[in-house]
Image (cartoon, grey):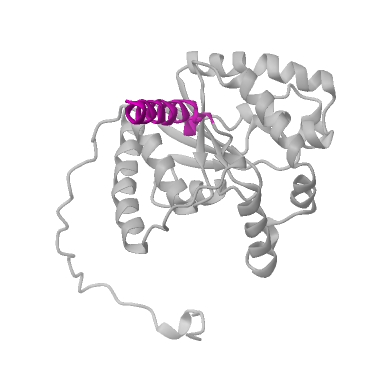
């Protein structure tokens, strides 16, 4: 009897431990290491091809239905925002999609309504716009680095949800992604940038300083989420320590949020080119060619 009782207690104890374990969605991913096997190159490229084909369908639907889509990418430095945007947009028609990555505001822009310089880049009908950082600079880098006053910061947290609701009411679809990267992975990527001359431009003194203020940025992000993670315009967190997984998960999720249809036109029959015998090509020596060095 005692033995059976012990087994029952052991089972109860196991269940209680399991029940008290935090759900992954509740964890602060930036403080947790996720160890998964790396995706094989073949699998990644195969899945990416499928998703990119769907992105083409999404863009065609946006264009034909005259929809307006804004996708915001935020996160710490070296979180993989730019790589994800590039992966999404590289196969899209650039006439109907744009990447917006604004620099430091000019002296004139500093005197404007804060959201004014971003409004100029919002989509017209049939367009998709991808913000590589956005108006949320005020809640992150400007707050932490002291580039705005406390009054300006508080006003932003108060007015931002209403600003986004106003855009939504006007017919703009807004999707907000936060790319979450761990301290260890960020440091690894910083070193990679230092060692690769092609990527060194990505690392600025501001990025280095941001590492010294890791906790301040964490607090600022928590405060930002508390005020702007609304029902109408929620934040979606992407686990970004694995770049390939982050890209696939982000694209898959984006496609799942918009109820698009396949409106891609049928393939075009390519007729044979007619040969016009009357055309005489000018002498090749009259043209300037790029040297064949390779």
Residue 246 is left or right of residue 180, and the answer is left
**Res 95 → quadrant:** top left
Q: Residue at x 32, y 62 (%)?
A: 42
- Say whether residue 62 is left or right of residue 73: left
Q: Nearer the viewer, residue 25 or 59?
A: 25
Q: Is residue 53 above or below residue 280?
A: above
Instruction: Tell me the residue at 77%/22% (across/down).
Output: 153
Q: Position of residue 118 (x, y in %)?
A: 63, 30
Is residue 78 highlighted in magenta? no
**Which region is colored magenta?**
1-26
Residue 90 percent coordinates (x, y): 43, 52
Residue at x 33% of width, y 36% of height: 58
Q: Position of residue 108 (x, y in %)?
A: 80, 31
Q: Residue at x 69, y 19 (%)?
A: 157
Rendered image quadrant of residue 201: bottom right
Q: How many marks?
A: 0
Question: Measured along the vertical axis of the image, is residue 244 above or below residue 117?
Answer: below
Quick one: quadrant of the N terminus? top left
User: What is the residue that sits farthest to the front in this orientation?
Assistant: 1
Relative depth, front residue between 243 and 269: 243
Q: Is residue 5 magenta?
A: yes
């Amino acid at each position: 009897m005692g033995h059976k009782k012990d087994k029952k207690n052991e089972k109860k104890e196991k269940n209680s431990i399991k029940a008290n374990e935090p759900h992954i969605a509740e964890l602060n991913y930036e403080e947790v290491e996720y160890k998964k096997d790396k995706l094989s190159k073949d699998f990644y490229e195969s899945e990416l091809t499928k998703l990119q084909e769907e992105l083409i369908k999404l863009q065609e639907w946006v264009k034909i239905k005259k929809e307006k889509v804004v996708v915001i990418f935020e996160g710490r430095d070296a979180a993989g925002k730019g790589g994800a945007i590039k992966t999404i947009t590289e196969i899209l028609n650039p006439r109907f999609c744009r990447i917006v990555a604004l620099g430091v505001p000019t002296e004139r822009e500093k005197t404007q309504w804060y959201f004014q310089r971003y409004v100029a880049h919002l989509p017209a009908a049939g367009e998709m716009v991808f913000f590589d950082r956005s108006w949320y600079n005020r809640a992150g880098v400007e707050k932490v680095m002291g580039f705005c006053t406390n009054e300006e910061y508080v006003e932003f947290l108060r007015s931002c949800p209403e600003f986004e609701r106003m855009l939504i009411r006007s017919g703009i679809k807004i999707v907000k992604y936060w790319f979450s990267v761990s301290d260890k992975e960020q440091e690894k990527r910083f070193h990679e940038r230092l060692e690769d001359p092609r990527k060194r431009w990505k690392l600025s003194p501001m990025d280095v300083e941001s590492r010294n203020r890791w906790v301040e940025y964490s607090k600022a992000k928590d405060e930002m989420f508390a005020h702007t993670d609304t029902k109408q315009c929620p934040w979606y967190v992407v686990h970004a320590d694995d770049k390939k997984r982050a890209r696939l998960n982000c694209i898959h999720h984006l496609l799942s949020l918009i109820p698009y249809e396949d409106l891609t036109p049928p393939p075009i029959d390519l007729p044979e080119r007619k040969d016009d015998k009357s055309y005489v090509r000018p002498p090749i020596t009259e043209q300037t060619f790029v040297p064949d060095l390779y």
